[in-house]
Amino acid sequence: MSATPAAVLAVVGAGPRATGLLERIAANAPELWDQERELVIHLIDPYPAGPGRIWRHEQSPLLRMNSMAEDVTLFTDESSTLDGPVRPGPSLSEWAAQFSGRGPRHEPYEEPADPEVLAELRTLTGTDFPTRRAQSAYLDWVFRRVLADLPPRVTVVRHRTTATAVTGPPDGPQRVRLAGRAAALTADVVVLAQGHLGSAPTGEHRAMASFARRHGRFHLPPAFTADADLSGLRPGEHVVLRGFGLAFVDLMVLLTEGRGGTYRTAPDGTLTYLPSGREPVLHVGSRRGVPYHAKTGYRLQGPRPPLPRHFGPEAVDALLAQDRPLDLRRDVWPLMAKEIGYGYYHELFHAHPERTALAWPEFTAAYDRLDWGGAGMAGLVAAAVPDPADRLDLAALDRPLDGLVFPTPDAFQEHLRAHIAQDVARRENPEFSADLGAFLALLSVYGSLPRLVAAGRLTARSVAEDLDGWWHGFFSFLASGPPGFRLRQLLALSRAGIVRFAGADLRIGTDETTGTFTAASPTVPGHTVHATALIEAYVPAASLDRTEDPLLRHLHRAGALAEDVVTDSCHVHRSGLLTVSPADGRVLDPGLGGPHPRRVALGAPTNSRAVAAFARPRTDAPAFRQNDAVARALLRTLAATAGPGREAGTADGDPVSRRIRPPCRTAGAPSAG
């Protein structure tokens, strides 16, 4: 055994983000870790390692991913720009193929215990949208493979409980308190990787909840759908849902099929909903008043566009070289939009040249030198793309109901059904594969933004209104929509009268006289919906002030953490996100005047904004780049520590790596989650 004490790393959270970090530790250890020294990694999470809370198996089998199976991976590939080594691995669809004999066996090999999940995996194709239970099985396998890939001197110990606090000096060991356990866990470095977290209701939501209690009504604040208790909604009850994204789709499924309803498919493919009689009536609206765009159901028909081209490292360098405050919409969006347009037209010209009037080299030479949004660009596109329907109009895509007014609710229902049907048809027809080119460019833009944001050069107003507001919504609206079959189900529910569309710029109020919630929209002037239930159909926003995570709450109240504060001469914007160092994810500690050398945070609660823990293959995912940089920094930091001493191993835990460490037994310790 090495004379050097073991180094100890504590990772709070054991879901996909922590799994990705472990994968990068395993990949970089041969270069950066002394193979004679022991490294103990403690994983702390009450939920299953790999899937974590969001992707755990214990949720409705009706819930599905909004990504195709071939578009989900936790592994780096040839597109990844990393300092560490690339270690390819199978996507979800490639992994699933082994269970039907269509693909090679992936070690460690073990068939999922749930027979329904195994049956799904045996028939899963690359273009299917898997259940979340199938994704849970994949994430469980990735976690076990990562464990198998760790060097022999690395031990992983699982703690199936919640971390409640972390204390310790910047130049010494950190002590992590665990729920239900007397002994603290001592570590050299602590990583916070809790993933998406709940938040206490805002003042507005508390007021709505108070109204509901006074009148015996139902109110659900923003929540993770799989955790929400919907049993209080009565059959036939009128419910307003504020939000038209993925949370709404999940709620729609649970309140219809989840209550026994079924769909019947006509010979022409039209769906008809057959109610069970247990469904409430759902009135849905949002700022846009329309559902997120359906995911594309096809592959590129032409060659993959060479991205980035107009908004990559060189463009970011040029923006930063201006040495002045930047406004996202004025200074950055024209480059972002030009990149999206390039992806769109690259596919249109290469896959559907009969619908273009210029040769691609001629078009792209002019496109490269023109500014997005200018008259010259509009003239070029008009000359090169004869049919206006083939031209990319980002403003119209963003707010399709702007300027539209309908005389009656029924007239609006008909219009929106036609809009949704057209969107589904377009996203399932490869004749419109240029939309997929735009989608890939959108992902490229997303990957290039973090470096610009981390430089802190965007104005406070631009961060608050443009980045965290408009851009986040625009990206989600175009890139994070549901599968097309979900929107066909929505149409069937609309025709059956189970779902009613409420309009754009939805205004929610209360009526004390009738004890009802009200919903109104300028889309249908003069029309007001009265309902006895209100659901905020979106996930909780990250908030240090209101977080439900006890560890973050403890640190924030103790003053050890700072909110993400962006200032200029007139504004202060508090995003609610935990501020971390852009290079290595170290937590900013106001008491130190800089990053804490022994505390790191990753993912959704942080201002790094590289949120997605898994990604589409061959997109140089920013989260994978971040995981690699943080893993390398962690290994270097841990290598320089003397180790926290023998007390590091006293906390109760379960060994899960090849090197077995006998678990301690503590009375009252929580069981496996």
Image (spheres, rainbow, N blue to C red):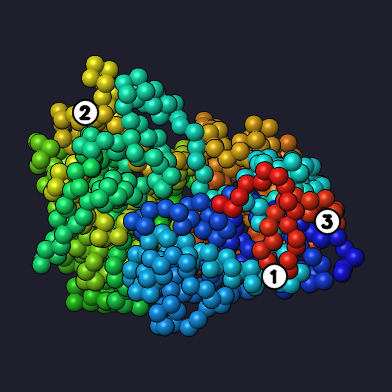
Q: Nearer the viewer, residue 360 or 79?
A: 79
Q: Nearer the viewer, residue 319 or 236?
A: 236
Q: Position of residue 162 (x, y in %)?
A: 62, 45
Mark 2 neighbour class, 10 Å CA radius: few under 14, some 14 to 19, many 20 or more: many
| Callout 3 amino acid | Gly
Residue at 87% from the left image edge and 63% from the top image edge? 4
Q: Which residue is mark 1?
A: 658
Q: CA distance from mark 3 to mark 1?
A: 22 Å
Residue 132 showing in the rendered view? yes
Place residue 223 in its image quadrant.
Answer: top left
Task: Give residue 530's mark.
Answer: 2
Q: Which residue is mark 3?
A: 643
> Position of 253 compared to 414: left or right?
right
Mark 3 neighbour class, 10 Å CA radius: few under 14, some 14 to 19, many 20 or more: many
> Position of 231 compared to 45: left or right?
left
Residue at 20% from the left image edge and 33% from the top image edge? 522
Residue 55 showing in the rendered view? no
Q: Position of residue 481 (x, y in %)?
A: 33, 55
Vertical position of residue 80 compared to residue 168: above or below:
below
Place residue 216 in its image quadrant.
Answer: top left
Q: Position of residue 428 (x, y in %)?
A: 23, 66
| Callout 2 amino acid | His
Q: Which callout, 1 or 2, points to the residue nearer the camera?
A: 1
Secondary element under disc 2, as helix, strand or loop, is: strand
| Callout 1 amino acid | Arg
Upstream in the sequence, badge 3 or badge 1? 3
Secondary element under disc 1, as helix, strand or loop, is: loop
Q: CA distance from mark 1 to mark 2?
A: 60 Å
Upstream in the sequence, badge 1 or badge 2? 2
Q: CA distance from mark 3 to mark 2?
A: 63 Å
Which residue ends up furthest to the front in the rendered image? 667
Q: Nearer the viewer, residue 433 or 613?
A: 613
